Amino acid sequence: MKKGFCLFLALLLTVFALTPAFAEVKYKDEYKLSCNVNELTPQGKALARFVQVVRDRTDGKVNIKVYWNGQLMSGKATNELLLMRKNVGDFSYSSFINWAPQYTPGNLFLLPWFISDKPDMYKAIDAIEAGKAGKMIESDIAKMGLRVLSWGEAGARELSNSIRPIRTPEDMKDIKFRVVGSPIFLDIFKELGANPMSISWAEAITALQQKTVDGQENPYSVYLPNKIHEFQKYLTEWAYTMDPMILVVHEEIWKSFPEDVQKVISEAAQECGQYNKALARLALDNGDAEKWLKEHDLFPTLPQDVNPRKFVQDYGVEVTVLTQEERSAFRAKMGPVYEKWVDKIGKELVEAAEEDMKNAQY
């Protein structure tokens, strides 16, 4: 009898030991996640899947709610890092374009034609994120009390306008472009002879429709869901900057989760980043994105997702795809921008990124 009781007790202790820790922790009813775009973008679709996967794999214990279109930031995307550090949100999926005004090294990705002049810009940016430069950035962000869970992507930033096709720097002259409220963008466009105007995204579409401005710069992932192709008939694929995303969580929130929940969230975040990148690169890369999506049964069905370039061309947009030689003509005018911004960003970080890209497997 005594022996049987001991065996029962041992089994009971084993069961408790194997019971997932997330069943014993007091969780918040809702974890707030800030995202500056909507759920129709590649970023949004991947993020929605991340939220669902985390909820499913934690048996509903971790319930993350996404606040789309910068709702938590009152539409002021460039304040996101500042407000995240003040605990306005628990998670954030954001672009360095929005963080750069408060985190100057984030302008690394905004250096014009720094990444896209490589043999394969997608492999180049992947190399930065996974390499020494990426680790330096993650370390900086950790010092702010935020943990990077994964890297995603909005895509290469292209140029649209309602005035004329753009193939040379001279074509930019006097065109009014809406740009992100980050000083480096103003410097880039001024060097090209354009007239840049810093307008918040909450007001940008109206400004474009009313022709307060003539054009804008954004990846396809923003251009299409916001239907900019309906009133901007000229698009130039110049890939002047890349637009990486980072999924971050407050370190305090992270530490409140037991190890098994951290593992679930970490794995789901990696899947989110891969899915996001594949959607953003589909039909624009060397075929890797299409292969990944099909292998994971995640290939999209909407024409604008399957081939964004063809979709806008079929709609009537004139798409100009610059060659490397044509991009070089724009890059050649960026001397003053590099002279000013490399020091601001930090030479060590820029050199680390250059080394990472040099070591990429093209």
Image (cartoon, rainbow, N blue to C red):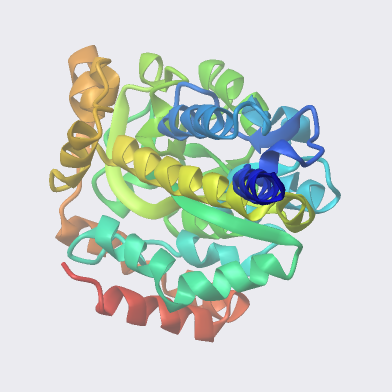
Across and down, in percent, residue 220 comes to 36, 33
Q: Quadrant of the C terminus?
A: bottom left
**The image quarter in which residue 278 lies:** top left
Against 292, residue 330 (above or below) is below
Give the side of residue 1 with respect to residue 356, left or right. Answer: right
Q: Is residue 318 visible?
A: no
Give the side of residue 30 with respect to residue 303, left or right. Answer: right
The residue depicted at 78 percent of the width and 36 percent of the height is 27
Please name whichever residue, 331 or 3, is drawn nearer the observer in this view of the structure: 3
Please name whichever residue, 11 or 57, is drawn nearer the observer in this view of the structure: 11
Q: Quadrant of the N terminus?
A: top right
The residue depicted at 73 percent of the width and 34 percent of the height is 32
Across and down, in percent, residue 348 comes to 52, 86
Please name whichever residue, 133 or 150, is drawn nearer the observer in this view of the structure: 150
Please name whichever residue, 173 or 151, is drawn nearer the observer in this view of the structure: 151
**The image quarter in which residue 38 lies:** top right
Across and down, in percent, residue 77 comes to 68, 40
Across and down, in percent, residue 201 comes to 62, 31
The residue depicted at 19 percent of the width and 36 percent of the height is 295
Check the image and name the residue furthest to the front: 1
Q: Is residue 21 visible?
A: yes
Against 206, residue 151 (above or below) is below
**The image quarter in which residue 140 lies:** bottom right
Against 57, residue 339 (above or below) is below
The residue depicted at 47 percent of the width and 20 percent of the height is 226
